[in-house]
Amino acid sequence: MNTKNFFNLKQEIQVSGKCHGCGGCVTFCTAVNYGALEMGEDNLPRYKSVEKCIDCGLCYRICPVAGHGEEELQHRFHWSAPAGRIQAVHSARVRNPYIRGRATDGGAVTGILLHLFDKGHIEGAIATTRHDHGRKPLLATTRDEIIRAAGTSFDLPTSGMAEFGAAYSTFSPSIQAMGDLLSTGLRRVAFVGTPCQIKSMRKMQLLGIIPADAVKFCFGLFCSANYTIEPTALAGLPALEGRSLSDVVKVNIKENFMFHFNGGDTVEIPLADMAPFRRPACAYCREFSAEYADISFGGIGSEEGWTTVVTRTPLGRAVFADAMDTMLETMSIDENKGCADRALTAVLDCSTKKRMSA
């Protein structure tokens, strides 16, 4: 049987609207130095020169949407429905109040990254940072850069959404920052990404693709969907009537889409009402809680200011336990009885709903 190549990937994934634009196929194209593939202006992969493609099929095998390698991944990570392997669930937050103030939820991701960096377990972290119209990938190699990346893809500058002009995207193609590893020589990094990006990273590791071997820790983010927000269309939602979008200081996604305004007011909009702004590929995605990560993080199921933390692998469990000594604290039973059980129920419920609706 012939190996499927980028032409097949375009026909099966991109033409049908299922491409997430993660950029893995372009970043790790065997023929990238010959200029075979590139990211287009629409942030989707395309041929730059079809004649330079060597038809190796690597792009197809690492695509998170294509089914190649799915059974091997499930076996390797002891996957089970509906949300993958779960060792433990906690409500946690970073101890440092400054980082908590920058974070969307409890800052647990940043706390663990700093813990690993301070102890010399990693030389850097692939995360995201603010950009003109949303977020962009960042290979953070200093403590300050890791802190600067605190928060998810949904934070806005204090001047409000108006600064973002025509549209604001909650998606950041973090996989593309892997290309920077080839020139830095870093051998120990952590990777933070959405479920589709984590799956693509794990496929690269299974195939032994350089420099995916330098990724020692995979941290996943809960993801209901990603959105491209057009302020003019958004203003038409009844819940935002009379509100100025220039007063929005932060956007978050939990059970609902949450707009935080100057003065402390919050407007929550059901995710179903945000469907017109959802990236088309997200309608086909079956994964909510980053099931192949070492640890998964999100705000679902935890109190405001706390992060739901799902440890999945023995490595993830050990990292979380070690970070508890210095960087993190968990919500005690006395503070909120049953918080871990509620968080687990929320994760399972959201995972089931997304899998059924995909």
Image: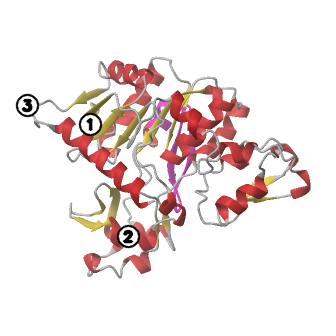
State the SS at label 3: loop
The residue beneath circle 2 is 274
What amino acid type is highlighted by mark number 1? Pro
Residue type marked 2: Met
Which numbered mark, 3 or 1, is in the foreground of this view?
3
In the image, what residue occupies the spot 22% across and 30% down? 330
Which numbered disc, 2 or 1, marks the residue that appears first in the sequence?
1
Please give the range of residues in magenta: 125-146
> Residue 121, position in %: x, y?
50, 19
Residue at (66, 62) in percent of width and height: 14
The quarter of the displayed image where residue 126 is located = top right
Where residue 73 appears, x then y in whole percent?
55, 34
- The numbered dot on residue 334 is 3
211 or 137: nearer the viewer: 211
Check disc 2 and report its element: helix, strand or loop. Answer: helix
The secondary structure type at the circle numbered 1 is helix
| Label 3 with label 1: CB-CB less than 8 Å | no
Rounded to the nearest angstrom, the CA distance separating label 3 from label 1 is: 21 Å
Which quarter of the figure has residue 303?
A: top left
Q: Which residue is mark 1?
A: 97
Q: In the figure, is residue 12 to the left or right of 37?
A: left
Q: Earlier in the sequence, mark 3 or mark 1?
A: 1
